[in-house]
Image: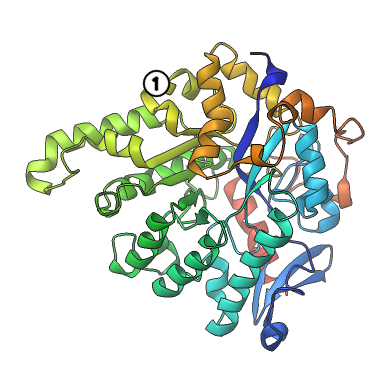
């Protein structure tokens, strides 16, 4: 296989919701309570009731030179139009040689937790449903061969969450975003019966539970003086704590076909994690009474937990220890870890020497199977390769744009610390 022959399906990208997304989908009686986008100084904000979501496209820096990276973008004019315009997004996907994409939300938060801020729960439910309808009809609908639809949930009520998931599953949605640890938002833990109805719906309709890094507690900052690079390094691996929690859930025994994805969590740490889980089981099960149904924890992990990576060499070299049938690739467009517009080149460095069979699995076949995504029902396979898609995008300008929207760095003259970023985020949160 050559690089241009790959078919790429990303199971982790992000959408920045357009300003008018609620106009068509919010019921008339809740129209005045719909999230609305406003301009405050140089930044755009979403606001509903008395709550502000300060960053509409946090870290949406695709197309920016790396020296301008930061906690941007704070306004629509600071990012590529493909962040919120689905037709432009497809053009950028073509330029990147990417066929398919699953896009996590921005306004609701990666796990949908921002809608918990609503005091009016009826309006909150209407907003959740409006987001789902917009995502399914307006974002994914025009391009069923390019996007994997995803649902958000009314997290404040397990039964409502189950009902909303079933509503979307009946429409053909097989992925849902859910906090990797809901207790971070004051919600019942994944072990609580509150979620039983939701798990059953996900099992009945074969819905993938997607737990994105940062949707729960997130990576802790070691100190205010810690270089921010240290926090960035630990972000993907921070989901390991939640992964251990999910691994020890009884849900896998109740619903043998249920699966989840550790979205944007990387794969290099997985061999140690599963080995450690087996060692813990062997050493401690006689007093902890852990029970994996006659299996090792590592076996349960490989049967139920999907992992994915953006740009890793070590993890790919250890694919046998991770499980080649449960690993997917991700692009993370338009965030700072994205390899756009050179994703194929970055990926090829790690997988060029692998058998074609394995390359096909991790680049698209696993994603298609696990997320019930069938682009070839709408387009020819030969028209879906990196080379074929890039041939459609010769007029797409991928040149890095300097100072888009007049972006400014967090600080200058010293190394950026966690404290710098935290203070900047606090200032933005207080700007109303």
Which quarter of the image is occupied by the C terminus? bottom right
- For mark 1, give the secondary structure: helix
Q: Residue 311 placed where, x, y %? A: 59, 28
Looking at this view, name the residue that lies furthest to the top: 353
| Residue 238 point in image, percent of width and height | 44, 44
Residue 168 vs 253, above or below: the answer is below
Indicate left or right for 1 with 394 as reference.
left
Looking at the image, can residue 367 be seen? yes
Task: Specify few, some or many for label 1: CA neighbours under 10 Å numbering under 14, 14-19, or 20 or more.
Answer: few
- From this view, report whether residue 165 is shown above or below residue 12: below
Q: Residue at x 56, y 24 (%)?
A: 360
- How does the figure colour the protein chain or chains? rainbow
Residue tagged 1 = 320
Q: Nearer the viewer, residue 39 or 35?
A: 35
Quadrant occupied by the N terminus: top right
Report which quarter residue 130 is drawn in: bottom right
- Name the side, left or right, on which 409 lies relative to 102: right
Q: Nearer the viewer, residue 59 or 267?
A: 267
Residue extending farthest right: 395
């Amino acid at each position: 296989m050559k690089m241009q022959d790959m078919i790429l399906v990303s199971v982790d990208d992000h959408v920045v919701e357009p300003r008018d997304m609620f106009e068509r989908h919010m019921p008339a009686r809740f129209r005045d309570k719909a999230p609305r986008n406003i301009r405050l100084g140089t930044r755009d904000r979403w606001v509903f009731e008395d709550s502000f979501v300060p960053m509409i496209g946090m870290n949406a820096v695709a197309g920016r030179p790396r020296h301008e990276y930061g906690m941007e973008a704070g306004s629509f004019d600071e990012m590529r139009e493909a962040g919120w315009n689905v037709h432009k997004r497809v053009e950028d996907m073509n330029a990147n040689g990417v066929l398919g994409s699953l896009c996590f939300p921005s306004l609701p938060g990666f796990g949908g937790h921002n809608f918990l801020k609503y005091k009016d729960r009826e309006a909150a439910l209407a907003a959740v449903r409006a987001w789902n309808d917009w995502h399914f009809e307006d974002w994914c609908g025009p391009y069923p061969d390019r996007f994997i639809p995803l649902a958000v949930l009314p997290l404040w009520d397990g039964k409502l969450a189950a009902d909303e998931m079933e509503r979307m599953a009946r429409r053909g949605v097989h992925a849902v975003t859910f906090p990797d640890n809901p207790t971070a938002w004051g919600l019942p833990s994944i072990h609580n019966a509150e979620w039983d109805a939701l798990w059953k719906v996900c099992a009945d309709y074969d819905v993938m539970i997607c737990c994105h890094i940062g949707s729960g507690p997130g990576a802790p900052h070691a100190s205010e003086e810690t270089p921010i690079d240290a926090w960035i390094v630990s972000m993907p691996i921070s989901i390991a704590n939640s992964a251990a929690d999910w691994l020890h859930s009884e849900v896998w025994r109740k619903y043998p076909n249920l699966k989840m994805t550790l979205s944007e969590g990387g794969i290099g740490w997985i061999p140690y994690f599963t080995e450690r889980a087996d060692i813990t089981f062997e050493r401690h099960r006689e007093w902890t009474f852990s029970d994996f149904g006659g299996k090792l924890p590592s076996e349960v992990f490989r049967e139920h937990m999907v992992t994915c990576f953006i740009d890793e060499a070590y993890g790919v070299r250890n694919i046998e220890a991770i499980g080649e049938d449960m690993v997917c690739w991700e692009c993370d467009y338009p965030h700072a870890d994205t390899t756009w517009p050179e994703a194929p080149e970055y990926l090829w460095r790690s997988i060029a020497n692998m058998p074609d069979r394995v390359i096909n699995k991790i680049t698209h076949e696993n994603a298609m199977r696990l997320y019930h995504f069938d682009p070839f029902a709408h387009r020819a396979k030969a028209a879906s390769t990196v080379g074929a898609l890039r041939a459609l995008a010769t007029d797409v300008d991928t040149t890095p744009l300097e100072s888009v929207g007049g972006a400014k760095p967090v600080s200058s003259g010293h190394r950026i610390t966690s404290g710098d970023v935290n203070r900047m985020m606090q200032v933005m949160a207080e700007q109303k």
